[in-house]
Image: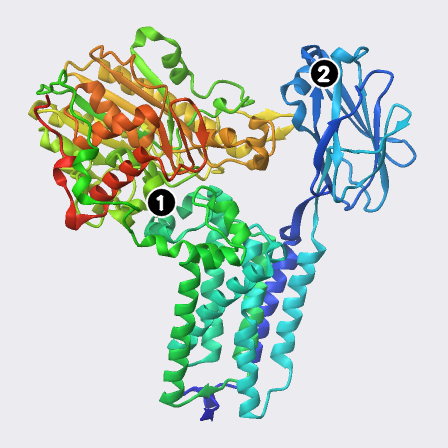
Amino acid sequence: MLREKKGIFSKHIPAWAPKALKCLFIVSVLAAALLHLKFFLVDTYSTVNFIPTNYSNSILADSPVSIRFTSSYSGLKSILLRFVPNSDASANTPLTFTLLDKKDAVLQRFVLSADEVAAAPENISLTVGPKLARGKAYTLLIESEASADTAAYRLSIGTAVRTDVQEWFWGDNRETDLPDVQFLYHHISSFYTLIFVSCVLFSFLAVFLPGLRSEKAKLAYHAAVLLGAPLPLLYTTELLNMGTILQLPFSVVMANYLILLLILTLFYILTNRFSLAVTLGSALILIGATANHFTLRFRQSTVLPSDLYGLRTAIDVMPGYQFSLSPGLLIACAVFVFLLCLSLRDPVAVRGWKFRILSATLTAAFALGLWGLVSTPSLYQKLGASLDNFRQTPQSKINGFYLNFSINLPFLISSPPKGYDTKSLETLIPDPDPDTSASGPFPHLIAVMNESFADLSIAGELHTNEDPLPFLHSLAEDSALSAYVGDLIVPVYGGGTSCTEFEFLTGYSLAFCNSSGAPYGQYLNREIPALPWQLNELGYYTIGLHPAPGHNWNRNSAYPRMGFDETWFEEDGLTSNNSIRGFMSDSDTYEKVLELFGQHKKEGPVFLFAVTIQNHGGYDNPYFENSMTVREKEQEFSLAEQYFSLLKLSDSALKELMEALSQEEEPVLLVVFGDHWGALEDGYLETVFGKPLDQLSEEQDLLRYQTPVVIWSNYGLDLSGLPDTLSTNYLSCTIKQAAGLPLTPFERFALSAQKTWPVISTHGAISAEGTFVQQMPEDDPLLASYSYLQYNGLSDHRHLQKDLFLPMLFEG
């Protein structure tokens, strides 16, 4: 039975009120867009799918290059070119670039010194000052002072699907292949503007068009809205995903459409209201898409189901970031208003329990079918989708955000690795070294995981006014300090602190976990024999501290389950009166570390693990005074400047901590390592690497997952035998072995595996021969054994062989 839905207060509300409120809502959204037209500004590259094939002739003093092009838009922001030097002598050759109009009048001249060109010839960027007219012809003249081929540069050339270049000349010779030049425009997008205005206009039409009289027509109308709503929602979702629905295969589009339709249908089953189903479902879908959008902007990573475990953490750290509108967000608002106006007109409800049972049954069958699709690789691969645990962010643009999210849902359920057998686990453990004996006394252990502590100079020139990490570099260069400085491969980039923390404290690798976004929430739902627990068995008093709310990443639950005797979080008074950007400074954190160490060191050996927070992401705080400057070819990188200024403070605090511990009479072993790189501007990272990020080799990309690790003792411990590079899962057993502590059987296995695979990471592995593999071989027996032991210690609680994960007090 169809029945028009009338609210209990309907007779008290004037007929014009609902339309007036809707119009006010629409006008508000439109006014926001008109007042902030800059939000429709987008960056567009002129050249599409350029494929380099060769290099031009040498650019000499008597043979300049002239490139004639037509400006696609009025806002030319910069010109990017790629050169290659003929020899080392080219490093002494400057280049001059002149921008001319159609009448050869000089609009702007760029003179790059020999050093500026030689620093990154394959990534020359010219910032354009004059405003060029759309559709007008211009010329870029490239001149060199080189008189001989050996001192000259050559321009990269090739083919492209589209370019603004009309013709170009080397000297007087007209060339056929296209030059590798990109014109970057910063302009108002007519396409985004059209979509936004269309949503607003159709919203007005939905408000003012006459209502339907027939109840069947109303039902058909709302069913059409329910079936059609996923399409604009899908377009908006992919826009916020930094992609476009037009790039997705039709089968992938349909899979994403069905997932969004299922969400709307579930809300209909729950509410029995078409209007609420579309309104609430659309809100949920757009909230998820918006969360993914900001995660991409701040952390350069897509949202995965495991990130739900860290939802409270995300909410807590939000004030540390500067949020701003974008074209995608404005369009999302317009689409939501449009769907709201469509769904709230001509209300109708379907009564009767039989219809509701039928609807629920069909929806359940629909949901089961989709679950079968996303949980069966052979099925979703036929659609053109795929799962890549190592490259989730780019894969999300290929699969579509919600399909990629759904494909990862089954991995929240932990399942044993192929070939897992509890009866054979003990046979995987190597025999203990008969020369090894450890019975104490043991040194105190202080471990510091420093937030966003990274040395980006491993990737290239930083272009800073000074070294942000002078003390760290002095440790690496001065052998008399008896400190080890190595390279640590961590599982995350730009965020996800608890992932690195998890690998260190457990000795497990997230490469063998089903999902790696928030391991504390996903895996630590009961006690596990982690590093603090193992040290408790050796008589250590264990303390864990982090100057942030304890519920961040579920630390307040995870720390006790890993065996910490004492924990300190923000709610326990772990705060600072002299905060930096609202965060406790490294210096103050280390003062608390020394205070707690002093309180407990006389009672026996102490293990103190501290996670700092000073360098947390959000490097655009206007109230923080930067001490570092970053300049490259007139470009300013404000995020990088604040990040390096914070690193310099961390470097100084580390020096103070080591100086304080050097005065201790008790033996202390200190380890300090970074959890991940800070999330900086893509433009700056491309300047450091000398190439676009999407053109990085696998080895270069792995550098973004490399942080420094420092191991030092105040009692002259020999650290000369430690590996130059290791992954986080090996760090704790490496420290224990260096300190002469008893190892667990699992740690003996891990150290044995390290000789063959010194790096096991979520982003690839490195063999003992130095070979990098992006995907670890599934048939490698050593890696398989690692996964078996890890699954038993982490997930197989019913068959946990605890003795494999606790120290053997008398080895040999």
Q: Quadrant of the N terminus?
A: bottom left
Q: Quadrant of the C terminus?
A: top left
Q: Is 159 above or below relative to 413?
A: above
Question: Which label sits on residue 214?
Answer: none
What amino acid type is highlighted by mark number 2?
Asn
Please state the horizontal and vertical placement of residue 621, each as a whole percent of the image.
Answer: 47, 38
Per the image, label 1 sits on a secondary structure element best described as loop
Mark 2 highlights which residue?
Answer: 86
Q: Residue furthest top?
A: 480
Residue 377 image-quadrant placement: bottom left
Residue 460 image-quadrant placement: top right
Which is more toward the observer, 131 or 353? 353
The answer to whether residue 220 is left or right of residue 127 is: left
The answer to whether residue 647 is left or right of residue 57 is: left
Say which residue appears at 49% left-offset and 51% top-offset: 386
**Is any part of residue 552 visible from this angle?**
no
Please state the horizontal and vertical placement of residue 643, each as a whole percent of the image.
Answer: 46, 31
Per the image, label 2 sits on a secondary structure element best described as loop
The answer to whether residue 607 is left or right of residue 695 is: left
Q: Are marks 1 and 2 in contact (CB under 8 Å)?
A: no
Mark 1 highlights which residue?
Answer: 516
Say which residue appears at 29% left-offset and 40% top-offset: 787
Q: Earlier in the sequence, mark 1 or mark 2?
A: 2
What amino acid type is highlighted by mark number 1?
Ser
Please state the horizontal and vertical placement of residue 283, each as a whole percent of the image.
Answer: 47, 65
Colour scheme of this structure image?
rainbow
Which is more toward the observer, 135 or 50? 50
